[in-house]
Image (cartoon, rainbow, N blue to C red):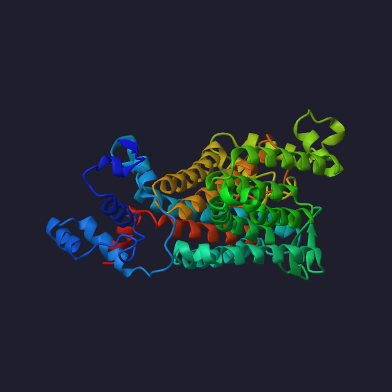
Amino acid sequence: MARRVYNRDEQQPDQPKKKARAARNAMSGIGWGEVTGSRNKKDDKDTKKSGSRLALLYRNAESKRVADEPAETDASDVLVVDDYRGIHALLNPLWCYYGFRIAVIALTCFGVVMVFSASSVTMIARGASPWKQALTQGGYCLFGLVVCAFAMRPHASGYRKFSFAFVVFSIFLQLLTVTPLGIEVNGNKGWIGISNKITMQPAEVMKLALCVWMPWAVASAVKHYKSDGLKAYLPVGLIFLACLATVMLGGDLGTAMILVVIGVTAMLVGGFPAKWLVGAGLVLAVLVVLFVVTSPNRMLRITSAYRPCPASALQGECYQSMHAKYAMASGGFFGVGIGNSREKWNYLPEAHNDFIFAIIGEETGFVGAAAVVILFAILGWCMFVIALQTPDKYASRVLICIAIWIVGQALVNIMVVIGLLPVMGVPLPFVSAGGSSLVMCLFAAGVATSMMRMQPQVQASIAASQV
């Protein structure tokens, strides 16, 4: 059964508070030395006598770790599960840890296959090899997996230490879009590159940077809120607004909205005052409305999504969304078969990129589209479950931010394809063509894996595999 534990001291009244704190720190797996709750010689003897395999593995894992500054932990406020049988198997952190990694690999490999299928005709029409886009995406996939493998190695505290430098670097990259290195694509100047051959989208770097930095920054500001008031949040707010401003300089409102969702999530889990958060949300909503109203292109996208399209608009603002619906409708239950899409024959623009889910629905049908949705649901569920069971608060908050980013962006992309949202130009994580999105999503998966390893049972499992 699952239960919520709020005060471990109250459960053990006969145990002194000092010993209770030591027990909590030992369970969290982050303590070194006398202050942070490592075991003494007497505890070592007791552990050996008890013969607890899990305790021995956990003690070995602690001894192998590199000491650094203590993390903010609270082992008394985590989800504790006594029995993983039945429906509670979905709360098993080990299942979630390995299930998350399998889902990431499955989405990435499936994405390479679908990029090849969706882009082959377009490549031939351009006089290039039908394999060109697929080979490029495969190269990004291999590079991203290497980045993911390296991103799993650092300790959570390492990401916390360098998070500020990471977000400053992302702002610098985004500012390059307004220099001669900037490249405009579909009306948005959000790319940088050299001669249109080597390009990247800095906003993808900024998404991960905010996921890593904001949870720590907001939590640090909360500690000074009582003494400094709202001034404590001023640095966080200014840097966050700077991130939004640099993205909006290129006119990319869709990406800016994803950044807003990440920022709001970080503030919620970090303890930002709710009344001020509501006020900030209203201000941001007003700004979004102003950006929409002042842009004829954005107004056309919105009106075409929420009103019946007249015949005159079928070759204009409604063209892309209508052909996406044609693709989804013609797929049926099992699809027309991979490689047999009709809409990819230059009918559906961006078929291999932002609208690749439409090709998935056409070629693999309801079954394939549902499988993609389920894989994203597994990603989000696994990150949330382990976040609730991780005593390290920073790791827990970063996991929640990454989950909201990846799953939220996937949900937005899918809703755009099926016509529930206006066209935004947001790629489908792990699946859409594009090196920046794929590499940074795999980088984020590596960071999430590192944060998951702060969960005690996951630590013990990794230690057992290394014995």
In the rendered image, the residue lying farthest to the front is 227
Quarter of the rendering occupied by the N terminus: top left
Q: Residue furthest left?
A: 49
Residue shown at 31% from the left, 44% from the top = 8
Of residues 80 and 130, which is closer to you in this image? 80
- Residue 17 placement, left or right of 404: left
Please tell me which residue is depicted at 33% across the width and 65% down the height of the picture: 32
Q: Quadrant of residue 176?
A: bottom right
Q: Quadrant of the C terminus?
A: bottom left
**Up-down relation of residue 310 to residue 255 (above or below):** above
Q: Is residue 165 above or below residue 307?
A: below
Judge left or right: residue 255 versus residue 374: right
Whether residue 83 is visible to the viewer of this picture, yes or no, is: no
Q: Position of residue 136 (x, y in %)?
A: 63, 65
> Foreground: 237 or 120?
237
* Residue at image location 51% in from the left, 48% down from the top: 400
Q: Is residue 418 visible?
A: yes
Query: Horizontal and vertical percent for residue 24?
Result: 32, 52
Tell me the residue at 57%/63% (across/down): 163
- Locate residue 354, reporting x and y percent: 68, 49
